[in-house]
Image (spheres, rainbow, N blue to C red):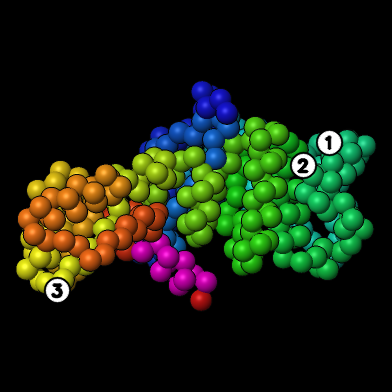
Amino acid sequence: MNHSSPMIETKSLTKHFSQGKNLVEAVKGVTLDVAEGELVALLGPNGAGKSTTLRMLTTLLEPTSGSARIAGFDVSDARSEVRSRLGYVGQGNGAGHNQRVRDELVTQGLCYGMSKPDSQGRADELLTDLELADLGTRKVSTLSGGQRRRLDIALGLVHRPPLLFLDEPTTGMDPQSRANLWDHILRLRREMGTTIVLTTHYLEEADSMAERVIVIDEGTVIADNTAAALKADLAGDHLSLTFETEEAAAVAASVAQQLVTVRETAVDGLIVSIRASEGDSTLPVLLREADARGARALAADITRPTLDDVFLTLTGRSLRESAAAVAS
């Protein structure tokens, strides 16, 4: 992908709401750039400002202050140009339950100013690409959850937008349906070069799919990097070593504290817990140095960090707990 051209540019983007006599600062000066062709995950707990930010970028909310441009067009001054260049797949289903699948796609194309023949051709193309061709005459209400989400993706792509927003696209889907949907999304992205901005509570999706992860909390961006870099720089690997005696565990902890890659060390009886930035290279050195001092480990284990560990390190709170609360 060529990421040289900016698809999204925001500077100090802010949104305030009045709630009675109180002022709610939903978004507090978000500044970010998303290059053409990138797949970016926007993460944060419920109420962090993600949805408000998306609604401003899609022209559904007017910013209180700051600016945002989509494909070079200002979201406040050029709404029609912005809307014609983006697709939006929200958390709810976008198609009418009593409408037929193909008719919904054709109507969507007409709404974007396409001719009827072009709308029909594009509908058939997307039905084939998203494996919905056999369902074109079915009512939307008869589709499975996975089929409906594929239809939502198709509706967002009818006008061939260079930018696609996916707001919790796989929520409520079983693992196989989620995997199938992502296969379709990634294939279409490869073929069309679409820029994708994703919000999700499934951290594994963000970790494996996104080239960049942007974490928002309390209306501000608190982290922005690749998933691998965030995990290495902010969370680190967790090492757990078990020893035969508490004295040996204490010796190993002392050795660990002298290593530059070790960030935290804790001893609980026979077990030494360590957080290190380079677990693979730290563990052999630690075992060798501890053994040289008479502290031979009985067992050792490395646990890789997750994006939830990153958020926990940054805020002291868990994204997974937030997702569970939303689901319940």
Tag 2's secondary structure?
loop
Amino acid residing under circle 1 = Met
Question: Earlier along the polypeptide chain: callout 3 or callout 1?
Answer: 1
The residue beneath circle 1 is 114
Foreground mark, 2 or 3, reads 3
Q: Which residue is mark 3?
A: 269
Badge 2: residue crowd in 10 Å (few <14, some 14–19, many ≥20) = many
Where residue 69 sits in the image (x, y, percent)? 52, 32
Asked if residue 106 can be seen in this view, the reply is yes
CB within 8 Å, label 2 to label 3: no
- Tags 3 and 1 in contact by the CB under 8 Å rule? no
Q: Amino acid at mark 3?
A: Gly
Q: Nearer the viewer, mark 3 or mark 1?
A: 3
Q: Amino acid at mark 2?
A: Val
Residue 177 vertical placement versus 66 (above, below): below
Q: Which mark is residue 56?
A: none
Provide residue 118's location: percent of width, then percent of height. 88, 35
* Residue position for label 2: 158
Which residue is drawn at the image coordinates 64% and 67% (left, top)?
Answer: 174
C-alpha distance separating marks 1 and 2: 10 Å
Image position, residue 151 (x, y; %): 76, 54
Q: Is residue 310 above or below residue 241?
A: above
Label tally: 3
| Labels 1 and 2 touching (C-beta < 8 A) | yes
Crowd around label 1: few <14 · some 14–19 · many ≥20 (10 Å):
some
Residue in the picture at 26% in, 44% down: 281
Which label's residue is closer to the chain start, 2 or 3?
2
* Secondary structure found at label 3: loop
Between 239 and 64, the one lying in front of the other is 239
Q: Is residue 39 magenta?
A: no
Q: Position of residue 108 (x, y in %)?
A: 80, 46
From this view, report whether residue 39 is shown above or below residue 271: above
